[in-house]
Amino acid sequence: MAVARSKIKSIGAAQSPLLGAAMFSPAVLYILLLVAGPFFLAIFYAFSDARIGNPEMHYVGLENFRSILQSPSFRVAIRNSLIFTICSQIVVIIGANILAISLENTFRGRGLIRFLILLPWVAPIALGAIGWKWILDSIYSVITWVLVAAHIYKPFSAPMWLGEPRLAIASVLLVHSWRMMPFSTVILLAGRTAIPKDIPEAAAVDGAGFWRTQLQIVIPMMRPIISVAVLFGLIFTFTDMTVVYILTAGGPFDSTQTLPSLAFAMGIQGSDLAAGAAISLFLVPVLVIIAYFMLRVAHRAEVN
Amino acid sequence: MAHGISQRIRGKVVKVLVLATFTILLAFPFYWMLITSFKQNVDLYTMENNPFVFNAKPTLDHVRFLFTQTRFVRWLGNTAFVGVFVVAITLMLAVPAAYSLARLSGRWGERLGIGIFLTYLVPPTLLFIPLSRVVAYFGLQDTLWALILVYPTFTVPFSIWLLMGFFKSIPKELEDAAMVDGLTRFGAFIKLVIPISVSGILTVVIFTFTLVTQEFVYALTFISSESNQMIGTGIPIFLVRGDVYYWGALMAACLIASLPIAFMYNLFLDRFIAGFTVGAVK
Amino acid sequence: MAVVETRDLTKVFKEGQLGAVNNVSLETREGEFLVFLGPSGSGKTTLLRMIAGLETPTSGDILIGGRVVNDLSPRDRRIAMVFQSYALYPHLSVYKNIAFPLKAQNVKKELHKEKVEWAASLLGIGALLDRKPRELSGGERQRVALARAIVREPAVFLLDEPLSNLDAKLRASAREELERFHRRVGTTSIYVTHDQVEAMAMGDRIMVLNKGVVHQLGTPTDVYDNPADTFVATFLGSPPMNLVELGDVIVGFRPEHFRPASTSTGDCVPFRFKVENKEYLGSEWIVSGALVGGKFEGRKIFSRLASAQDLRLGDTCNFVVPQRELKFFDRITEKRTEPRGLSWQ
């Protein structure tokens, strides 16, 4: 056996570093070329005056940033990005925790319920958003119909869910929360099943009721998992432009623009590559902060 | 003495209520898609009608319209086409990378793992502008090849994670035993590890495919003509004629596009979660 | 009045199948250390969990302090439980772990410190109060679990195999600590284990269970020297009691009573014994082999001896069992019967 061990060592040790490098190089190379490269290109564009269709390009320093920061729609976009992201995450985390508690124990039909609950997350974002657009339609909305039937509103006087700025913001918030809820629920559920069964039992014997057990024992124990769910939820919501694009196209009057949707509107639709790039770069600080927290969670988990 | 029992019953009732409320809120839009797909236009667009019931006979008109008068089928084909190629590229890049990262413990392995992770955090909404120029430079704009080129940027990091966790759970002794029996390390990888990992690889295939179908930003940016659209972009954009939304056909399309993905996703859900939690936290 | 009493307690998990616990009735004695002993699947843990309130009985009653508690949740039963894994709350410090039961029962905050320190000093863990469970050794964790259990001054302790997760060396010292703790505190305790050595060492009384049925309830002397049936006889003692069939009885004798003829005096029953294997355990020898000749040809027998150097493998020797050490069991019911005179050859 000692002979075999040394044989492995000689084979393994000699081949491993080179083989290992050969095996991950294609992936690393691809990512460097198509992620890192474009990332720096975006920075480059942000400092230029690039436009679609115009082959010439000049360095303009901080001009783009200056003009963006002064534009009101930009300020609205930043505000909206933060509101949508943070508020929807709060709703999602609370809702997902409640749902995860309810789904913990097996029961008949659990599989079906899980399937139904997952639908918002698995369906392509645009299609779910279009579904909501029909539900929130200014004339034919089913919500309007129900409210009118309940005599809360007179016919034709119901609010335009996507047409009034405040309601539009609420609608976008609703759709973001709706989409992310299954994702967080499923991750939290996994976290719950990882908790040893005797901990809640010990809490019960110690005299804790249901809510105390959940709030003081189970949920604090789930902190790493909750962090993962929240951090990913923040990223997915913060960097999403689809919901706004489909539901409101940024309107009414730019009131629901977010950083990504504004970047698209100006960069592609408006052909102003430089402005689009500059706007999208504002995503980076937030992403860096989130990345930092993620790494901290990962590091803590390894230490334990 | 009976309050223990009544407490339990109360708990159950609350649980059922909570589940029912959430399920309805989350699944309602799809139910709505279902109903809308089969309602006659007359029914749909008459405001007095109760929208929850069929006031006229259910119809297949919208579905017929969808399949014969729009490019829906073509978009399905486009999506499948892109999906197959992206899956292939992802597997070719991610499987070896994940294996070497899983077995390469130590500083390099960890650093690269973190690097891959950080790449996943760079969103399409940041890269789409420069990538649109790259695509144009290579003359690939408005072709599916642009998507095939770019999609692995988000499928590969995610797949590497999933697979890393998976490979790490295979005991090292298996490969050691194979190498004592005469295989090289690479040989052990091909002949031993990959066959064992079929379920992990299958998971990557499924999720890569779903990521491809769900993507919106790149598909919107790079593709402009109607016949080259993907499912996720064609439906919201081209099922609208001018200002008029063909809601019946739209909803039918959404449903048809979403349900198969939902089925596949559910089958592999546990692996997906493991990938997110173990992969991120490991 | 017994602290814990069960009446005809039954738990059936799957309809139509034999229950995990079947008609168990017991009464604890004040301050005793009662052990539920049995192999896995014997129902001992289910029985304990029913007493704790973590499982609901299918039928029968559970009484704690004279009150029927069937419908009470665990928190209302004045019990404390130590789990196999100790179930310490990993995110709380030792102090907060011990204080948690006080918090949960809405004990006034001013009293917490006093009680936690009392419990901690009882178990000698005063210095560990600021640590987290993952920083503690196995023995320290057991002490924290005990402190958390006692801080509420419960009427009864329930312990679910708390020593099984410890390695062998630690187990002995942890066991001794448990015994000392029990002597000091004096609370009635019910202890579940599958390890008969633990049961014998720690128990004031042992309840031997198998397949949900109580086979015997008695002191260690009772169950070891006067087993009620063949199951108890073979479950206690290692190696187990030797059993041979003779007519309509089963005769049993313990390995330590099966010795070379030269070493025994008094009324003995003789056997011819072929030595097949010897194990030297340091403090004793375990010799195994087969009986030779007569009605027991080929039966495998174990012997425990202080010394066995003279015995050679393959030798056939004269071994004896003192008459008074023979136990007789009815062949069909397997229950203990009166001693008989028998013809051995």
Image: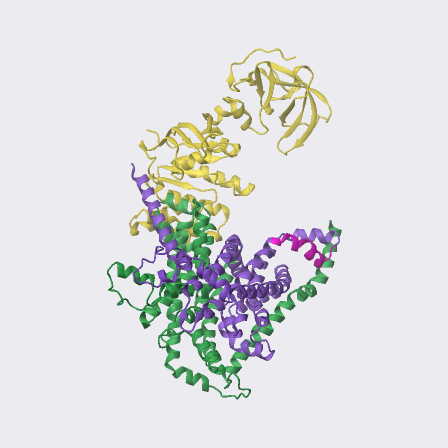
Q: Residue at x 39, y 43 (%)?
A: C149
- The stretch in magenta equals B183-198
At horizontal 48% and vertical 71% (from top left) the residue drawn is A288
Q: Position of residue C152 (x, y in %)?
A: 35, 43
Q: Which chain is yellow?
A: C
Residue at the image position 51 percent from the left and 77 percent from the top: B129
Query: In the figure, B223 relative to B81: above or below?
Result: below
Asked where in the image residue B57 lies, by quadrant, the reply is: bottom left
What shade does chain A have? Answer: green
**Can residue A295 be seen here?**
no
**Figure colour of chain B:** purple
Q: Is residue B185 magenta?
A: yes
What type of secondary structure mainly makes up the magenta span? helix
Residue C282 percent across, percent down from the top left: 63, 34
Quick check: A140 above or below A262? above
User: Is B225 a magenta residue?
Assistant: no
Position in image of residue A241 (x %, y %) = 44, 71
